[in-house]
Image (spheres, grey):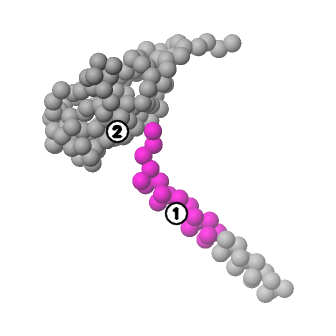
Amino acid sequence: MKFQVALLVLLVVAASGCVQLQQLQNTSQLENFNPIEIVTGNNANSTSAVVPVLIEEAGFDPSVVTIRAGDTVKWTNNGNAPSWPLSDVAGSSGDPEFDAKGGLFANQAYEHTFESAGNFTYHDSLRPIFVGKVIVLENVNYTKP
C-alpha cells in the first residue's frame, strides 16, 4: 500500500513538472511574437483614431497595425538614425499611397490618414530591411438593434 501511494505521489509530481515545462516552452515562443494592434476608431460614438508606430533601431513597432478607414497612422522616429516611411504599392495616380518625402530624424514624426480600406505594405526607404503593414478596414457605423 505504501508503495502504491509513493508511486501515485511520484506520478503527480512528474505530471506537474511536465505541465510547468510546457508552460515555459509556450512562454519562450511568445518572446518573438509581435501582436497586431487593433484600433477601433471611427464608430458611431467616436472620432478618428491616431495610431502610433515607433521607428526603433530594430524596425517598426508595431510592424502591423489594423485601423478603420479615416484613421491616421503616426510614425515617430525613436532611434538615432534617420528613417523614411514609404508605401510599397502606388496609389491610383501612380504615386505612393504615402511618402514621408525624406528622412525623419530623431523624434520627428510623419502622419498619414487612410481614407479607403485595403492592405498597405511599407518599408523604410533608408533601411529597406525594415518593413510594416497597415490593414485598413471599412468604416462601417452601426447602431445596436
The majority secondary structure of the magenta stretch comes to: helix
What segment is highlighted magenta in the picture? 16-36
Instruction: State the quadrant of the N terminus.
Output: bottom right
Residue position marked by numbered label 1 in the rendering: 25
Could you tell me which residue is drawn at 71 percent across and 76 percent down?
Answer: 11
For mark 1, does the 10 Å Cα neighbourhood hold few (<14), some (14 to 19), or many (20 or more) residues? few
Residue position marked by numbered label 2 in the rendering: 132
Q: Is residue 42 visible?
A: yes
Q: Position of residue 50 (x, y in %)?
A: 36, 23
Q: Position of residue 10 (x, y in %)?
A: 70, 79
Which sits in the foreground, 50 or 139?
A: 139
Work out whether 140 lies above or below 18.
above
Which sits in the foreground, 11 or 75?
A: 75
Badge 1 element: helix
Q: Is residue 78 visible?
A: no
Badge 2 element: strand
Could you tell me which residue is drawn at 42 percent across and 53 percent down?
Answer: 32
The image quarter containing residue 88 is top left
Q: What's the amino acid at mark 1? A: Gln
Q: What's the amino acid at mark 2? A: Gly
Whichever of labels 2 and 1 marks the residue nearer the N terminus, that label is: 1
Could you tell me which residue is drawn at 61 percent across and 70 percent down?
Answer: 18
Separation of marks 2 and 1 at Cα, in angstroms: 28 Å
The image quarter containing residue 112 is top left
Could you tell me which residue is drawn at 15 percent across and 33 percent down?
Answer: 103
Which sits in the foreground, 59 or 90?
A: 90
Please indicate whether residue 19 sits to the left or right of residue 108 in the image.
Answer: right
For mark 2, does the 10 Å Cα neighbourhood hold few (<14), some (14 to 19), or many (20 or more) residues? many
Tell me whether circle 2 and circle 1 mark residues in contact (CB < 8 Å): no
Residue 77 among magenta residues: no
Q: Position of residue 19 (x, y in %)?
A: 62, 65
Q: Position of residue 53 (x, y in %)?
A: 32, 34
